[in-house]
Image: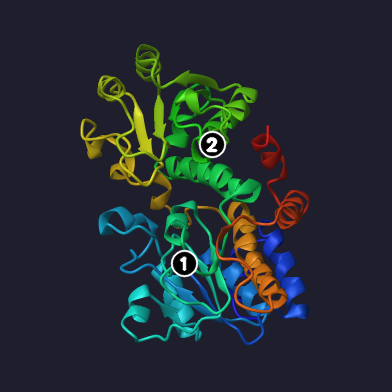
Amino acid sequence: MLFDEIINKAYEPREYPALSLLSDEWMNTRPFEGLKVLVATPIFRNTFVQYRALIAGGADLWVGRAEGAAANAAEVAAAGTSMPCDFSMVKWLKENGIPVISENDIKSGKVEDDFDLILDCAGQFSFCNPRVGFVELTRSGVHLFKNSPYPVYVADSGIVKRIETTLGTGDGCFRALDQMGFDALGYEGKNLVVFGSGKVGCGIALQGVRRGMSVCTVTDTRHRNTGTDFCHVLENNGVLIVDCLAESTVSAKIAEADYLVTATGVKGALSFAAASAILANPKLVVANMGVEDEFGEKVPANLVLNNKAPLNFMLEEPTHLKYIDASLALHAALGEQLLKDSAECMVGFPFTGLREPLQTLEQRLLVTTMQNGLIGPEIYDMMG
């Protein structure tokens, strides 16, 4: 089957148990038979496992890429684009007969807007008119579908997406540090300060704990127990929680820190006092894992690794397949669910606008990942 050579050379099956499950099923059931399916997941080698599952299900696969996407993840910041892209994989797709298109190809009329199903990412193709509907992969694209006249499943909710965002992004942060040589200095006993207690911040903190670091998380404790932070998970793993408004305590923690990583998701999130403390600590290694510049103008870009761009974007594979497998499987499986919903609806759409994934579907993929994948123990830790 197409993609087998690349996938089998790069990965072992236990890195993608959820997508393997879908591939095996869909090879027999063929839910996407004869359907034109556009997939806008960022194009990397690990995305090929998702493509293979959809083709096994009979899809006429089209691949969407961000307009002006950088040649690889390391060039995203320099190019000023919002979505990384590995052009060597784009080239391989085109050479093997898989159409790769951008939003302008559709808007200009070069490519017809006649897709049956769109598996989108960051709402890049939210302007299109799919016959069945959309599945959106990320939270950042949700606002573009808020008033959509089409059915839209959002994969970025529940425990499955947390595997990617918490575990995968945290892993990517430290792989980037390792690639820059910091692992040679050793992490054991070093002090790490993480700004943000959401999914990404939690993942970075837990990765620090696993490496023997003393970890402190700075967060707005007013958001505790609102479902947007993971302070309980952090505390269960020995992480100190400090309120961001306790500026003297925050400054003291920065003064003794060896590493500092921002992951709040908020532009200019750091206070003047925190920024001043960063400038006053010459030994501090500083990185950002958010899309925005969370440091503000007081901290110059040359003092932050990767010039303030998300640190894992410097990697060839920003998120390892073993962490993103379940998310990509949910993304694709919700496409199958949309087809089932549509078949049960006699007239029009079964629903319009946003809808969260079915818990039964998420649980099935989660159990498969924990039982058959490589990261079961890490998921248990994440769940506290």
Horizontal side of 288 relative to 381 (left or right) equals left
Which kind of residue does numbered mark 1 sit on? Ile
Q: Determine which quarter of the picture holds residue 104.
A: bottom left
Q: Quadrant of the N terminus?
A: bottom right
Q: Which mark is residue 68?
A: none
Q: Determine which quarter of the picture holds residue 283.
A: top left
Horizontal side of 341 relative to 305 (left or right) equals right
Of residue 171 and residue 353, the one placed in the foreground of this image is: 353
Relative to 91, say whether 225 is above or below. Answer: above
Q: Determine which quarter of the picture holds residue 236.
A: top right
Find numbered disc 2 in the image and state the secondary structure of the residue it sits on: loop
Q: Position of residue 246 (x, y in %)?
A: 39, 15
Judge whether residue 4 can be spotted in this image.
no
Q: Quadrant of the C terminus?
A: top right
Badge 2 crowding class, 10 Å Cα cut-off, few under 14, some 14 to 19, many 20 or more, is: few
Dot placed on the residue nearer the N-terminal end, 1 or 2: 1
Q: What residue would you read off at disc 2?
A: 228
Q: What residue would you read off at disc 1?
A: 43
Give the foreground label among 1 and 2.
Answer: 2
Number of labels in the image equals 2
Residue at the spot x=30%, y=53% of the render? 77
